[in-house]
Image (tube, rainbow, N blue to C red):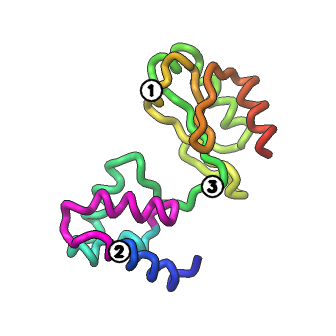
Amino acid sequence: MSVASMNDELCRILSRSESGRHNLIPILQDVQDHFGYLSEDAVYGIAEYLDLSANDVYGVATFYSQFRFTPPAKHQVKVCQGTACHVRGSQLIAEELSRNLGIEPGETTSDMKFNLERVACFGCCALAPAVDVDGKIYGRQSPKKVAKLLEGMA
């Protein structure tokens, strides 16, 4: 998407909300839902619309783990690190995913096919250890199972 069309889209998104600091988080969410991430241009556009500094916008956006500043990969892979998952070996699963994908948690493959994240808790403790791939939870995972899961996506 070109910067010009992104600015048009950004203007449409901003126009749906009244200007005011109290709308910062909902606007950030709307922008990220639309574009998949918060670009530098979007942050500056939001700041201008809300009469805030870009530092104010970045300060809020970086506080919450839901916001990202790089384009998302085709497949989002998240490993639960909650207590139940941790006790049942989620660290081994994260290591296997890192080895298979060639990236560390928080990174994206160079082909933009996968990104890998660690998440505090999915709330699926009965399914521990759990992995979320593109919004679908896979429970009772093992290093061998996640390796097979990735094969089906390659």
Looking at the image, which is closer to me, 16 or 121? 16
**Viewer-nearest of labels 3 and 1?**
1
Expressed as whole percent of the image width and height from the top left, the position of residue 106 reads: 54, 45
Disc 3 element: loop
Residue extent of the magenta highlight: 15-38
Residue at screen point 36% across, 61% down: 28
- Residue position marked by numbered label 1 in the rendering: 123
Mark 3 vs 2, N-terminal side: 2
Main SS of the magenta segment? helix
Residue projecting furthest to the bottom: 4
Vertical arrangement, residue 73 with respect to residue 104, above or below: below
Mark 2 vs 1, N-terminal side: 2
CA distance for labels 3 and 1: 24 Å
Asked if the stretch drawn in magenta spans residue 16, the answer is yes
Asked if the stretch drawn in magenta spans residue 105, the answer is no
Expressed as whole percent of the image width and height from the top left, the position of residue 123 reads: 44, 26
Residue at screen point 58% across, 26% down: 130
CA distance for labels 3 and 2: 23 Å
Tell me which amino acid carries mark 1. Answer: Gly
Residue at screen point 76% across, 31% down: 147
Tell me which amino acid carries mark 2. Answer: Tyr
- Residue position marked by numbered label 3 in the rendering: 73
CA distance for labels 2 and 1: 35 Å
Residue at screen point 23% across, 71% down: 18
Disc 2 element: helix
Disc 1 element: loop
Mark 1, Cα crowd under 10 Å, few <14 / some 14-19 / many 20+, is: few
Vertical arrangement, residue 65 with respect to residue 99, above or below: below
